[in-house]
Image (cartoon, rainbow, N blue to C red):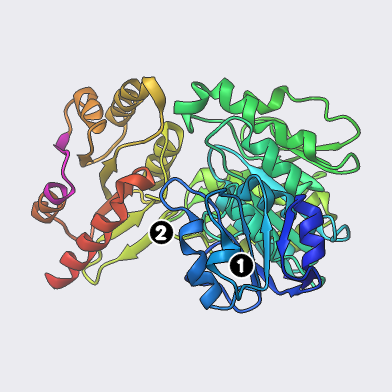
Amino acid sequence: MEAFYLAELILAINGRFIIGSPNILAKGISIDSRTIEKGEVYFAIQGNRYDGHDFIGEAIEKGASSVVYSRDDVDLVKSFPKLLSIIKTDDTLVALEKLAKAYRSKFQNIKIVGITGSNGKTTTKEILTSILSIRGETLSNKGNLNNRVGLPLSMFNLTKSVEYAVFEMGTSLYGEIKILSDIVKPDLGIITNIGFSHLETFLSPEGVFKEKKVLYESVKESGYVIINNDDRYLRTISNAGNRKIITFALDTNADIYAKNITLHQDQAVFDLFYNKIFVKVSMPAKGRFNVANALAAASCAIGFGFSLEEIKKGIEKFIPPKMRMETLITSGGVILINDAYNANPSSAKEAIQAVIQSYCGKEINLVLGDMLELGNKSLDYHFELGKFINSQNVKSVNLYGKMSLNTKEALTAKNVFYSKDSHALLRNLKQLPVDNNSLFLFKASRGMKLEDTYTKFYNTLEKKR
């Protein structure tokens, strides 16, 4: 973060200066008293599980230069007389967002991308970051820092040396994409797809579409909007004001598309076309859906004037993110694939198809946990997943979680195990006959913590050797 005077912060958040000096040079922003560094400003954020006001003392002990707080029942002047500066605001989260928006406005020369979507946004972000970094220093938000707290904190990592930035945006409530995209104010916006995500809030894909498409309205008038022509919702967008539109697709007409796709165990190979010219790309990622993610990233790079050769180089050197088709092979040759970062009906089907297509001849065993946040139709979606699996060539289906019982009820003529208990699931996996022809796909929503079973099962198989 570029250092700034406290007076700038007070102006940006419309805060009330209680005591101290507005001429202090702040070195950074922190919301975590455990990791705060000397000279940083501490924002006391009130979350669902923790209240940052309870850790103000620890932040001060570690060298916070000032504190931004909101609770009326906290008297910082009396409690912490040695504190240099204190700023009061009505809502510390909103204040953090306001500061991030003001900080972003300092960097008009940086080309910034905003990404959202139901599936594939993290992988698309990583592929695009790999491409853009060929030309210059590129920043992106790490891990799951894509919400109203994480994105502002990521924005503060912008510096004068950065040439490109890619910000992923997530949402679970109406209005969040509007808030986040107003902070990012992107030169280019992309929605990867519209699917069955966060239906507890949005109720249907139509509701998801309504929330996500707001991103395009925040793109600069001189910027680009990237449209997935394979998505039945997104391809209805034909007018983006003065913004230019670039389309991509696997299965329909588009500006950027792929042909001659071949799927392998450790890569997808395809011809990437733009303006009737193509390059052959060998991407280090599994599945047809990841080819779509690569096309999405390529479309963004085209908007910034990158050549097909630069795009090819960036795609081929990208490193897939953790827990997205992450693969371990035991010393006995058993393949374990961890795709348990998240799950919804569309991503679960895509993952199953990806391993079947990429590992022809292998015996596929599915290890599936509940898909969460699907709303009042959750039982139906889990049942439909079972019906889908009936049509797939898999050896066994191992289910875990309350909702997955409905997947079991839809399954016919399959070797099926079901339990609400992860320990029982692991015991069952240990009893299955395995050899160097066996493959296990682990897929569930993150809240199910299926990655723990994945790791324990891998360790068990290694001990057997």
Foreground: 388 or 89? 89
Image x and y of residue 414, in percent: 17, 33
Image x and y of residue 176, in percent: 62, 37
Write down the residue under mark 2.
326
Q: Is residue 404 visible?
A: yes
Dot 2 crowding, Cα within 10 Å, few <14, some 14–19, many 20+: some
Residue at 63% across, 29% down: 211
Span of residues in magenta: 415-425
Q: Is residue 417 magenta?
A: yes
> For the view shown, which residue lies furthest in the front direction?
78
Query: Does 449 sit above or below residue 107?
Result: above
Q: Quadrant of residue 397?
A: top left
Write down the residue under mark 1.
317
Tell whether 439 sits left or right of 342. left
Tell whether 62 sits left or right of 188. left
Foreground: 257 or 445? 445
Q: Secondary structure at mark 2?
A: strand
Tell whether 70 sits left or right of 188. left
The amino acid sitting under disc 2 is: Glu
